[in-house]
Every structure is written in structure tokens, then in C-alpha cells.
Image (tube, rainbow, N blue to C red):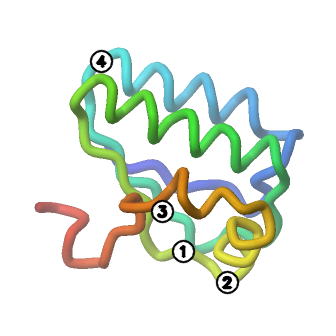
Amino acid sequence: MRIELPEDLTIARAEALRALLLEALERGEDLALGAGVVASADAAGLQVLCAAARSAAARGVRFGLDARSEALAAAVARSGLGRALEGSWLDVEDRDG
């Protein structure tokens, strides 16, 4: 399942995103998250991504982020959560394979 992340990946959207990702994971669907339009991200939004990555790994489904924006990459670097999302960044050609 492909999901485009919102421009505002903050606490204001975290619960709705968490519910959407959890629903897909419970169905056993692989997840590819488009992160190209993310303009702002806070700890709550990043935590949802980290939790989804861990849940996907535990369920044996693929999880990936692609087309990451500079804002998301910077937020991940500032937060120190890069290790938690390590291996989640996809190259564009990896999306469908």
C-alpha cells in the first residue's frame, strides 16, 4: 500500500496517521510512504514512523520511505532517530519491487 505523508507531520496529524498505518499493517500490507511533501515534522510524527517501521519488521512486512523531503531528513537527523529508521529509506526504483 502506498501512502503519501502529509505536509504537516506533527502531533496534529499523528493519531490519524497512526490509525491508517496500523490498519494497513494489521492487514499484512507492505507499506511505501511517500515523504516528498513533508514540510514540518515533530517528535510525535517521527515516533509514528518509527513505531510503524518496528511493527512492520515484527510482522514480516516491507516498510519504506521514499522521496523524502529535506525537512523530513533534517528532522530525523535533529531528533537522533536516524538509527530507528535505518534501512527504511527507499530509492525510487525500490518502491515497486
Q: Residue at x 80, y 41 (%)?
A: 44
Horizontal and vertical percent for residue 82?
59, 63
Amino acid marked by disc 2: Glu
Query: Residue 71 vs residue 51: left or right?
Result: right
Secondary structure at badge 2 equals helix
| Residue at the extreme bottom of the image, as rendered | 70
Q: Decide which of 86, 21 is in the foreground and name it.
A: 86
Q: Which residue was labeled with disc 1? A: 68
Residue 87 picture location, percent across and down:
36, 61
Residue 54 located left or right of residue 41: left
* Location of residue 17 (image quadrant): top right
Sequence order check, earlier mark of 4 and 1: 4
Residue lying at 50% horizontally and 31% vertically, measured from the top left: 21
Task: In the rendered structure, find residue 50 and report the number of the disc placed on it.
Answer: none
Q: Is residue 2 above or below residue 38?
A: above
**Label whose residue precedes the other's in the sequence (4 or 3):** 4
**Residues under labels 4 and 1: Cα distance?**
25 Å
Question: On screen, 95 above or below 93?
Answer: above
Image coords of residue 77 (percent x, y) = 70, 72
Q: CA distance from mark 1 to mark 3?
A: 7 Å
Q: Please tell me whether residue 3 is drawn above or below residue 60 in the rendered image.
A: below
Amino acid type of the residue tagged 1 in the rendering: Arg
Residue under label 3, please give it: 34
The amino acid at mark 4 is: Arg
| Mark 3 vs 2, N-terminal side | 3
Q: Which residue is mark 4?
A: 27
Which residue is under mark 2?
70
- Which callout, 1 or 3, points at the residue further toward the start of the chain? 3
